[in-house]
Every structure is written in structure tokens, then in C-alpha cells.
């Protein structure tokens, strides 16, 4: 039987997006993100991170620096009993026209090649139109947009991760199967 999944953007969702975050000392988890992920885990979701990291392609930081930060971040999740199945990233600059940069489906395709996922009962949380478009292009049924900017066709929209968490705590049936 296929698993339900929660696909997460990183910058702006898991951490505050100050632009091109690649050092542990600049990484600040968003308020409520641990509790939000625990809600999904309690309902049987597998967690995956899909993140555009064009700072690598632009030469602002290296893949090695990205991997070092990712290992630290995963350790912080593990301390809170949150397992991220895998982290997928696009390291290309936008001009590269690759198939992995959101809203292209390369990262989700990679996940689907390694995991049996029920996209009909899965969710994606992002803070940009390209995140929500990735969900649509990949046939991920439910989406949550976070932030102030106008994002078209998200299932739900919230200003903050904390606001999203509070809503889902009160309306848990939305993510329950």
C-alpha cells in the first residue's frame, strides 16, 4: 500500500528565509514547524523536503556547505522525533532550464522512483507559486501556501507556519485519512 506524503519546501517553510541560507548560524526554524510536522507524522505521513538551491548554481555557496547544513537540520529534527525520509534539491541557477528546478517535477519524480506514494492523499507546503505549481504538475492533490504573497490555486493559505499549525490542530480531520 502506498504511503501518504508531506512534501516541504525549505526556505520560508522550515526556516526563516533571509536569502541564500547555507550556514548553521544563519538557520532559524520557523515558529511552529516542529509541531506542524508532528501533526502530519501522527496521521501516518512520510516527510520529504524539495528545495530549490540556486545559490549553489550562482556560486554563493557549495554543495558541500548545503549538505553540512542539511545534516545539522536533520539532526535537529531527529532530536524531536521527526524523521525526514529524504531531502532533494535543485542546485541549478534558473537559467539552466533543468528538469529539477521547481515547478518542474524532477525532485518529486526522484522521490516517486524510490518510494511508493499515494499522491491523491498527499500534501505540499510551500511559500512560492513554483511550489504550488510543482504540486499541480506532480499530481500532489493538497497544497498549503504560506506567507503574504499572492499564490494561485493553493488548497489553503496562511500567513505563517504557526497559523497553519493552529488551524490543523483544530481541524485535524483535514489531514486524517
Image (cartoon, rainbow, N blue to C red):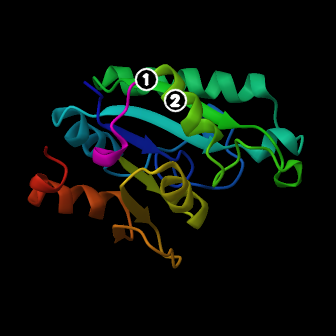
Residue visible at 65% across and 39% down in the picture: 106
In the image, taking residue 171 as reference, residue 23 lies left or right, namely right
Residue 60 in view of the camera = no
Helix, strand or loop at label 2? It is: helix
Between residues 36 and 150, which one lies in front from this camera angle? Answer: 150
Few, some or many residues within 10 Å of mark 1 (<14, 14–19, 20+): some
Q: Which residues are magenta?
A: 116-122
Residue 111 marker: 2
Residue 44 quadrant: top left
Gap between marks 1 and 2 measured at Cα = 6 Å
Residue visible at 38% across and 61% down in the picture: 144
Residue 125 picture location, percent across and down: 42, 53
Name the residue carrying label 1: 115
Residue 102 picture location, percent across and down: 65, 51
Between residues 28 and 36, which one lies in front from this camera angle? Answer: 36
Question: In the rendered image of this protein, does residue 56 appear above or below residue 84?
Answer: below
For the N terminus, the quadrant is: top left
In the image, taking residue 99 as reference, residue 133 lies left or right, namely left
| C-beta proximity under 8 Å, tags 1 and 2 | yes
Residue 6 picture location, percent across and down: 36, 41
Residue 153: in magenta span: no
Few, some or many residues within 10 Å of mark 2 (<14, 14–19, 20+): some
Amino acid at each position: 500500500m502506498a504511503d501518504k506524503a508531506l512534501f516541504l519546501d525549505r526556505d520560508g517553510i522550515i526556516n526563516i528565509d533571509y536569502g541564500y541560507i547555507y550556514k548553521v548560524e544563519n538557520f532559524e526554524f520557523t515558529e511552529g514547524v516542529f509541531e506542524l510536522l508532528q501533526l502530519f507524522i501522527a496521521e501516518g505521513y512520510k516527510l520529504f523536503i524539495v528545495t530549490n538551491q540556486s545559490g549553489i548554481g550562482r556560486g554563493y555557496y557549495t554543495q558541500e556547505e548545503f549538505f553540512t547544513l542539511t545534516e545539522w537540520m536533520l539532526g535537529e529534527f531527529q532530536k524531536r522525533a521527526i524523521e525526514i525520509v529524504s531531502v532533494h534539491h535543485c542546485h541549478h541557477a534558473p537559467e539552466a532550464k533543468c528538469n529539477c528546478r521547481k515547478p518542474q517535477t524532477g525532485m518529486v519524480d526522484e522521490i516517486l522512483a524510490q518510494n511508493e506514494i499515494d499522491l491523491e492523499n498527499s500534501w505540499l507546503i510551500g511559500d512560492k507559486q513554483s511550489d504550488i505549481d510543482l504540486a499541480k504538475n506532480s499530481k500532489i492533490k493538497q497544497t498549503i501556501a504560506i506567507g503574504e504573497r499572492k499564490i494561485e490555486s493553493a488548497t489553503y493559505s496562511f500567513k505563517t507556519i504557526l497559523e497553519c499549525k493552529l488551524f490543523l490542530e483544530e481541524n485535524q480531520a483535514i489531514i486524517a485519512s
